[in-house]
């Protein structure tokens, strides 16, 4: 009885201390957090033209996500920011007419940390309807930091927000800016959240604000006063009477990050790059309470052990040695084609088909899709080796790896999780995943 009473007293003291500390939690002042600039970059489509220095044909803004204590490698932007990249072959060499002649050109995505410092990036996932794209660098960068995310809630209506991005090239030409794309060159416009809207027909969640979204801000973060991203700056709608500005809710991005196993941190877990003083006190209180309870449990266990040793009839049964199997991993086939809107299909040892035959294909392309046969190729997964098998079914236009290698018909080709291939044309990309 005395042990039980001590447990109850320790528990009550722990709860009272935690309640007292949470009651003193501070709310950050609503002002622009300049640390946001440490996460923001220019995302540009660069057209590589033989015999010239090339040129930038489209650009916008992006921001990095990831673990706060690691160099980031993934970033978010608008799909329309990279649309020129996709329209120009998505990294493959294509023919283009320039100055009256036909030449081979190649589009690349460059992430600029300053006007003359950049890394190349690659498309990991996108959703044209939501106007969201996820990019990845070849290796993590120390030039920028990951930014925390925050799901929008109704109590944010009327609160301050900031739209962050890079000003238009014309702005720089007019004022003669010395630097264009460095950390301190981002433009910031302030406003308030007007309302949350769901777009008719698509169901896309958007945030309406009176904070001006300037040219070049597309794909940049809309942040709250704590410097956490609540939306992705996207568009504005204007008539003679008024202009409204919109960002895609970060809640539209989070499922895409989860589907691609990309790390990110929410504001509730981390604020301003570290744990607050109040949270440290709270953690200390929890650890102290746990320590007290552990001591009590150890004392009780010791008494119980002595009692069991004195009573052979109550000896513990022998363990079987069997352990519960961990949850089996799931293999997925995901279409990156715009017409499928990110659809995926679970894979196993039995091959599934891809093509235009909706009755027999796991992922079916629309009738008339260029380059796709009725029964184009098949895909299966071997859980023993963790490898995928892609087999072209003697299609008319072929099945290809992303490097342009065409697969021999009816010969299985091995792929690893995270790798992609395309059917017929390089806009019909599919990716194999394990999660």
Image: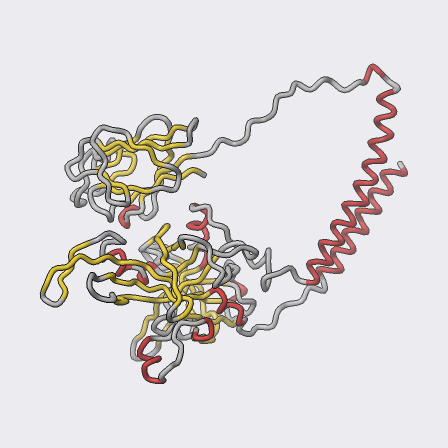
Q: Quadrant of residue 4?
A: top right
- Tell me the residue at 84%/15% (across/down): 312
| Residue at the outermost right position | 2
Q: How is the image coloured?
A: secondary structure
What residue do we see at 23% from left, 54% from top? 89
Residue pushed farthest left? 100
* Viewer-closest of 260 and 179: 179
**Would you place residue 339 above or below residue 150 in this image?**
above
Q: In this picture, is 275 found above or below 297?
A: below
- The residue located at (46%, 49%) in the rendering is 262
Q: Position of residue 51 (x, y in %)?
A: 19, 64
Most extreme residue toward the bottom is: 175
Q: Quadrant of residue 352?
A: top left
Q: Please name whichever residue, 386 or 251, is drawn nearer the observer in this view of the structure.
A: 386
The residue under the point 25% across, 39% down is 364
Task: Give the tally of numbered discs.
Answer: 0
Quadrant including the C terminus: top left
Asked if residue 207 is positioned above or below residue 303 in the image, the reply reads below
User: Does 429 sit left or right of 320 as displayed?
Assistant: left
- In the figure, is residue 209 to the left or right of 350? right
Tell me where residue 413 appears, x and y as whole percent. 29, 32
Residue 94, position as x, y percentages in the image: 19, 54
Quadrant of the snapshot with the N terminus: top right
Displayed quadrant of residue 346: top left
In the image, residue 385 above or below residue 16 = above
- Image spot of residue 128 (x, y percent): 31, 55
Front residue (pair 248, 329): 329
């Amino acid at each position: 009885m005395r042990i039980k009473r001590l447990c109850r007293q320790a528990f009550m003291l722990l709860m009272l201390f935690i309640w007292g500390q949470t009651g003193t939690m501070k709310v950050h002042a609503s002002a622009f957090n300049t640390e946001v600039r440490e996460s923001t970059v220019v995302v540009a489509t660069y057209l590589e033209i033989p015999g010239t220095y090339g040129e930038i044909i489209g650009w916008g803004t992006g921001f990095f996500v990831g673990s706060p204590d690691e160099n980031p490698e993934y970033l978010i932007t608008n799909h329309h920011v990279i649309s020129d990249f996709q329209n120009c072959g998505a990294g493959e060499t294509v023919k283009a007419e320039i100055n009256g002649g036909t030449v081979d050109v190649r589009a690349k995505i460059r992430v600029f940390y300053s006007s003359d410092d950049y890394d190349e990036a690659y498309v990991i996932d996108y959703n044209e309807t939501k106007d969201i794209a996820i990019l990845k660098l070849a290796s993590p960068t120390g030039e920028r930091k990951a930014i925390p995310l925050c799901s929008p809630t109704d109590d944010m209506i009327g609160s301050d927000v900031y739209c962050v991005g890079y000003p238009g090239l014309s702005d720089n030409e007019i004022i003669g800016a010395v630097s264009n794309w460095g950390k301190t060159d981002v433009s910031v416009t302030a406003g308030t959240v007007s309302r949350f809207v769901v777009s008719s027909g698509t169901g896309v969640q958007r945030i309406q604000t009176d904070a001006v979204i300037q040219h070049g801000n597309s794909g940049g973060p809309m942040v709250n006063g704590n410097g956490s991203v609540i939306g992705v700056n996207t568009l504005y709608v204007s008539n003679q009477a008024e202009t409204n500005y919109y960002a895609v809710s970060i809640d539209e991005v989070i499922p895409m990050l989860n589907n691609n196993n990309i790390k990110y941190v929410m504001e509730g877990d981390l604020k301003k790059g570290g744990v607050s003083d109040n949270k440290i006190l709270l953690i200390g209180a929890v650890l102290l309470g746990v320590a007290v309870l552990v001591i009590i449990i150890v004392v009780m266990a010791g008494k119980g052990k002595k009692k069991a040793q004195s009573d052979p009839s109550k000896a513990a049964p022998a363990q079987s040695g069997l352990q519960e199997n961990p949850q089996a991993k799931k293999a997925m086939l995901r279409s990156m084609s715009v017409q499928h809107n990110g659809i995926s299909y679970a894979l196993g040892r039995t091959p599934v088909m891809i093509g235009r035959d909706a009755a027999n294909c796991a992922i079916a392309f629309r009738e008339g899709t260029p380059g796709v046969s009725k029964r184009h190729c098949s895909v299966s997964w071997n859980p023993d080796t963790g490898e995928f098998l892609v087999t072209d079914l003697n299609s008319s236009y072929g099945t290809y790896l992303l490097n342009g290698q065409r697969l021999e018909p009816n010969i299985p080709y091995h792929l690893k999780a995270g790798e992609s291939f395309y059917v017929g044309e390089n806009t019909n990309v599919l990716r194999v995943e394990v999660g």
